[in-house]
Image (cartoon, rainbow, N blue to C red):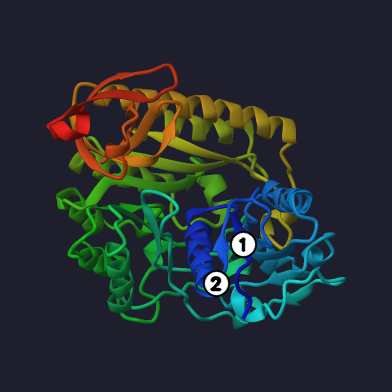
């Protein structure tokens, strides 16, 4: 056992990675490591990587260089999606000592016989077809809310995506086992849980269960005030789920639904499992049952074969939909994907221009959504960090708000009235019905 040493963990990518990093950090702490910040001269660095975009790969290499500047003798382990996809390539990065694939990352402590730097990096990465176990994870102590991993892997094989190659087939625990983990979270002073995975709507593989079954049981868990559905495919967002959320006191009126394109031609080329008409129907149902619901959208610009007409079809489709914000991704070529072999490549300058247009649209949508909420009352879960004299938080429907900093408000849920949107796009609020000792 290696003890009395310091470890720093850094996460690239999604909420799923964040939940796994937090669980891995607890493994180190159980072995006697002290978790420290990146610049606090740790003995070990663990970098949990993403490989959704080319920039994520570059960021990994930059972080290795940064780590070596802080401590040239630090032991550096690379885990995560990039590590599964290109373990040998990562092993060649100067300063890397260990590379662990999709399954091996959860056994990271077992691989540490010493933390002496190596001349040649150790590589432990099984073939992705051999990765079948589901390892539950959740974040704790890192942020106000917890990211609860309920599912892993994906069977969809969209033509632009490397995730099935990096994480394997769709898999999950049973509802019963997932609820046990949720109760662990409930005992850790967490007020809000975000359900996360690669394709959470596909929950239930091999168990005769489904995502709706899980939602209904999570709604009964005591000790957790709020749940959020992080991202769910439109074809898996059944009307019964929408109806249940609309009547739930725990599931928040906030959902993120990937679109990727508003052109049916491009959706087919992407190998998505729906058309724009189904997407519009899902949004319409949500807004009918929950007019105040926040709807986030993923969209990709510059996919091979996307003409100006296709892009404008996407732009106009989103402009007319009552959605609240966009996550805009500029298409990047990824090895071993079908899209990478397609002709009609969109020039990077055109991709950039289209991305800027959608970012502007996103800001317009967000401000419009925030404006619609001004004058209303809501409950806010306040964060646990000070930001230039203010404390931020989010309403049930994901409006970001701020109040003058008060330590007693951290990680509490308070009733507020939304007053106005400031120049940064954050809503200023008045606190309602707060105990006098908090305000004084």
Categorize mark 2 by other alpha carbons within 10 Å: few (<14), some (14-19), many (20+).
Answer: some
Secondary structure beneath dot 1 equals strand
- Residue 29: horizontal and vertical position, in percent? 52, 68
Number of numbered discs overlaid on the protein picture: 2
Q: Is residue 302 left or right of residue 423?
A: right
Residue 153 in view of the camera:
no
Examine the rendering and report whether any part of residue 427 can be seen.
yes
Choose the circle earlier in sequence order: 2 or 1: 1
Q: Residue at x 49, y 62 (%)?
A: 22
The numbered dot on residue 105 is none
Specify whether 345 is left or right of 92.
left
- Image quarter where the N terminus lies is bottom right
Where does the image place residue 138, in percent across and percent down from the top left? Answer: 42, 64
Percent across and percent down for residue 416 are 20, 30
Check disc 2 and report its element: helix, strand or loop: loop
Discs 2/1, front: 2
Label 1 sits on residue:
7
| Vertical relation: 57 (above or below) 384 | below
User: Residue 330, how many percent across, how many down?
Assistant: 63, 40
Quadrant hosting residue 235 = bottom left
Q: In this view, does 58 lie to the left or right of 239?
A: right
Q: Nearer the viewer, residue 46 or 103?
A: 46
Mark 2 and mark 1: Cα distance apart in space = 10 Å
Quarter the C terminus occupies: top left
Relative to 152, say whether 112 is above or below: below
Left or right: 114, with 155 as reference point = right
Q: Nearer the viewer, residue 257 or 407?
A: 407
Residue 32's disc is 2
Residue closer to the observer: 274 or 347: 347
Residue at 38% from the left image edge and 23% from the top image edge:
367
């Amino acid at each position: 056992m290696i003890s009395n040493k310091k470890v720093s963990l850094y996460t690239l990518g999604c909420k799923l990675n964040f939940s796994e990093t937090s669980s891995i950090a607890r493994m180190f702490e159980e072995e006697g490591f002290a978790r420290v910040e990146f610049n606090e001269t740790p003995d070990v660095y663990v970098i949990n990587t993403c490989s959704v975009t080319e920039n994520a790969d570059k960021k990994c290499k930059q972080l290795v260089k940064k780590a070596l500047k802080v401590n040239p003798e630090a032991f550096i382990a690379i885990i995560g999606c990039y590590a599964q996809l290109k373990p040998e390539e990562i092993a060649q990065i100067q300063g890397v000592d260990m590379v662990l694939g999709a399954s091996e990352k959860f056994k990271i402590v077992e691989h540490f016989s010493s933390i002496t730097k190596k001349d040649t990096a150790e590589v432990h990465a099984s073939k992705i077809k051999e990765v079948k176990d589901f390892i539950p994870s959740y974040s704790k102590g890192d942020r106000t809310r917890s990211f609860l991993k309920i599912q892993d892997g994906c069977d969809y094989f969209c033509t632009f995506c490397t995730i099935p190659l990096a994480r394997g087939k769709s898999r999950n625990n049973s509802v019963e086992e997932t609820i046990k983990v949720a109760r662990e979270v409930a005992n850790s002073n967490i007020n809000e849980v975000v359900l996360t995975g690669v394709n959470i709507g596909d929950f239930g593989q091999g168990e005769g269960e489904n995502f709706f079954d899980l939602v209904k049981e999570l709604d009964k868990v005591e000790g957790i005030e709020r749940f959020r559905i992080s991202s769910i495919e439109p074809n898996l967002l059944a009307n019964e789920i929408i109806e249940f959320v609309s009547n739930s006191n725990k599931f928040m009126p906030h959902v993120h639904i990937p679109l990727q394109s508003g052109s049916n031609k491009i959706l087919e080329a992407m190998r998505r499992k729906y058309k724009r008409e189904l997407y519009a129907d899902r949004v319409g149902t949500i807004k009918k049952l929950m007019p105040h619901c926040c709807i986030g959208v993923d969209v990709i610009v510059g996919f091979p074969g996307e003409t100006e007409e296709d892009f404008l079809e996407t732009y106009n489709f989103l402009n007319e939909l009552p959605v609240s914000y966009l996550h805009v991704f500029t298409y990047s070529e990824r090895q071993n994907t079908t899209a990478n072999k397609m002709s009609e490549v969109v020039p990077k300058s055109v991709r950039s221009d289209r991305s800027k247009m959608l970012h502007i649209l996103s800001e317009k949508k967000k401000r419009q959504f925030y404006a619609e909420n001004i004058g209303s009352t809501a409950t806010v879960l306040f964060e646990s960090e000070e930001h230039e004299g203010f404390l931020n938080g989010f309403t049930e429907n994901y409006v970001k708000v701020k109040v003058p900093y008060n330590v007693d408000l951290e990680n509490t849920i308070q009733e507020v009235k939304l007053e106005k949107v400031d120049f940064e796009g954050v809503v200023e609020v008045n606190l309602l019905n707060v105990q006098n000792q908090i305000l004084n």
